[in-house]
Amino acid sequence: MPNLATVDDYIANQPDGVRKVLQALRRIIKEVAPEAVETMNYKILAFNLVPNGKRDQQIMMAGYTKFVGLYPFPTTMEKFADELKGYKQGKGSVQFPLDKPLPKDLITRMVKFRKEELAGNHEN
Protein backbone atom coordinates (compact mmCIF):
# COMPACT_ATOMS: atom_id res chain seq x y z
CA MET A 1 0.00 0.00 0.00
CA PRO A 2 1.50 3.36 -0.98
CA ASN A 3 1.82 6.10 1.62
CA LEU A 4 -1.55 7.82 1.24
CA ALA A 5 -2.08 11.33 2.59
CA THR A 6 -5.86 11.56 2.81
CA VAL A 7 -8.85 9.46 3.77
CA ASP A 8 -10.20 9.78 0.23
CA ASP A 9 -6.87 8.55 -1.21
CA TYR A 10 -6.88 5.59 1.16
CA ILE A 11 -10.41 4.55 0.22
CA ALA A 12 -9.85 5.12 -3.50
CA ASN A 13 -6.80 2.82 -3.47
CA GLN A 14 -8.73 -0.15 -2.05
CA PRO A 15 -10.19 -3.02 -4.09
CA ASP A 16 -13.85 -2.48 -5.04
CA GLY A 17 -15.39 -4.66 -2.32
CA VAL A 18 -13.24 -3.18 0.43
CA ARG A 19 -13.87 0.36 -0.86
CA LYS A 20 -17.65 -0.09 -0.70
CA VAL A 21 -17.61 -1.38 2.88
CA LEU A 22 -15.20 1.36 4.00
CA GLN A 23 -17.48 3.98 2.43
CA ALA A 24 -20.48 2.51 4.25
CA LEU A 25 -18.61 2.40 7.56
CA ARG A 26 -17.44 5.99 7.03
CA ARG A 27 -21.05 7.10 6.45
CA ILE A 28 -22.20 5.41 9.67
CA ILE A 29 -19.46 7.06 11.72
CA LYS A 30 -20.12 10.48 10.17
CA GLU A 31 -23.88 10.16 10.80
CA VAL A 32 -23.17 9.68 14.50
CA ALA A 33 -20.24 12.09 14.69
CA PRO A 34 -20.62 14.67 11.91
CA GLU A 35 -18.17 16.94 13.71
CA ALA A 36 -15.43 14.27 13.67
CA VAL A 37 -12.38 15.34 11.70
CA GLU A 38 -11.06 12.70 9.34
CA THR A 39 -7.34 12.11 9.29
CA MET A 40 -4.77 9.42 8.65
CA ASN A 41 -3.09 7.82 11.66
CA TYR A 42 -0.76 4.80 11.55
CA LYS A 43 -1.48 4.71 7.78
CA ILE A 44 -5.18 3.98 8.39
CA LEU A 45 -8.33 6.09 8.56
CA ALA A 46 -9.06 7.91 11.80
CA PHE A 47 -11.91 10.08 13.06
CA ASN A 48 -11.00 12.60 15.76
CA LEU A 49 -13.94 12.58 18.16
CA VAL A 50 -12.50 15.59 19.98
CA PRO A 51 -10.63 18.52 18.40
CA ASN A 52 -7.02 17.54 17.62
CA GLY A 53 -7.69 14.15 19.17
CA LYS A 54 -4.86 11.81 20.06
CA ARG A 55 -5.00 8.14 19.11
CA ASP A 56 -7.09 7.23 22.16
CA GLN A 57 -9.61 9.95 21.22
CA GLN A 58 -10.17 8.55 17.75
CA ILE A 59 -12.12 5.79 16.12
CA MET A 60 -10.11 4.19 13.34
CA MET A 61 -10.90 1.87 10.48
CA ALA A 62 -8.89 0.00 7.87
CA GLY A 63 -9.46 -2.18 4.85
CA TYR A 64 -8.07 -5.69 4.46
CA THR A 65 -8.50 -8.51 1.96
CA LYS A 66 -11.46 -10.21 3.65
CA PHE A 67 -12.69 -7.69 6.21
CA VAL A 68 -12.68 -4.11 7.41
CA GLY A 69 -11.30 -3.42 10.84
CA LEU A 70 -12.94 -1.00 13.25
CA TYR A 71 -10.86 0.28 16.16
CA PRO A 72 -13.26 1.94 18.61
CA PHE A 73 -11.07 1.64 21.78
CA PRO A 74 -10.92 -1.17 24.36
CA THR A 75 -13.61 0.27 26.65
CA THR A 76 -16.07 0.28 23.75
CA MET A 77 -15.17 -3.31 22.93
CA GLU A 78 -15.81 -4.28 26.56
CA LYS A 79 -19.17 -2.49 26.65
CA PHE A 80 -20.44 -4.32 23.53
CA ALA A 81 -18.65 -7.64 24.10
CA ASP A 82 -21.82 -9.74 24.10
CA GLU A 83 -23.03 -8.27 20.80
CA LEU A 84 -19.62 -8.67 19.18
CA LYS A 85 -19.24 -12.38 19.98
CA GLY A 86 -19.90 -13.36 16.37
CA TYR A 87 -16.96 -11.31 15.08
CA LYS A 88 -13.21 -11.80 15.28
CA GLN A 89 -11.81 -9.28 17.77
CA GLY A 90 -8.72 -7.85 19.35
CA LYS A 91 -8.49 -5.89 22.58
CA GLY A 92 -9.59 -2.67 20.88
CA SER A 93 -10.72 -3.85 17.47
CA VAL A 94 -13.33 -5.83 15.60
CA GLN A 95 -13.31 -7.35 12.11
CA PHE A 96 -16.39 -7.05 9.93
CA PRO A 97 -16.26 -9.58 7.05
CA LEU A 98 -16.72 -8.15 3.57
CA ASP A 99 -19.27 -10.83 2.67
CA LYS A 100 -21.75 -9.85 5.41
CA PRO A 101 -23.73 -6.64 5.92
CA LEU A 102 -22.31 -4.17 8.41
CA PRO A 103 -24.23 -4.18 11.71
CA LYS A 104 -25.23 -0.52 11.36
CA ASP A 105 -27.21 -0.31 14.60
CA LEU A 106 -24.40 -1.85 16.62
CA ILE A 107 -21.73 0.38 15.04
CA THR A 108 -23.94 3.43 15.62
CA ARG A 109 -24.30 2.58 19.30
CA MET A 110 -20.57 1.91 19.64
CA VAL A 111 -19.64 5.29 18.16
CA LYS A 112 -22.23 7.06 20.33
CA PHE A 113 -20.89 5.30 23.42
CA ARG A 114 -17.29 6.31 22.65
CA LYS A 115 -18.30 9.92 21.96
CA GLU A 116 -20.20 10.10 25.25
CA GLU A 117 -17.36 8.39 27.10
CA LEU A 118 -14.88 10.98 25.81
CA ALA A 119 -17.27 13.76 26.81
CA GLY A 120 -17.32 12.32 30.34
CA ASN A 121 -20.92 11.09 30.15
CA HIS A 122 -20.11 7.40 30.79
CA GLU A 123 -18.36 5.63 33.60
CA ASN A 124 -16.10 2.79 32.49
Image (spheres, rainbow, N blue to C red):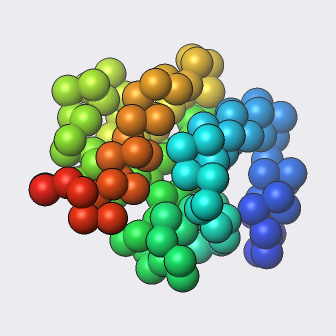
- The picture places residue 45, in percent across and down from the top left corner, at 63, 61
- The picture places residue 54, in percent across and down from the top left corner, at 45, 79
Give whichever of 32, 63 is nearer the camera.
Answer: 32
Residue at 47 percent across and 35 percent down: it is 108
Q: Is residue 75 left or right of residue 87?
A: left
Q: Quadrant of the C terminus?
A: bottom left
Residue at 33 percent across and 54 percent down: it is 116
- The picture places residue 6, in percent across and down from the top left corner, at 79, 69
Pick out the residue farthest to the top: 100
Q: Is residue 72 visible?
A: yes
Q: Is residue 123 left or right of residue 111?
A: left
**What is the quadrant of residue 15 in the picture?**
top right
Q: Quadrant of the N terminus?
A: bottom right
- The picture places residue 36, in percent across and down from the top left corner, at 59, 62
Q: Is residue 90 visible?
A: no
Residue at 79 percent across and 75 percent down: it is 5
Give whichever of 65, 107 is nearer the camera.
Answer: 107
Residue at 43 percent across and 46 percent down: it is 111
User: How many marks overall?
Assistant: 0
Q: Is residue 17 left or right of residue 27?
A: right
Give whichever of 72, 94 is nearer the camera.
Answer: 72
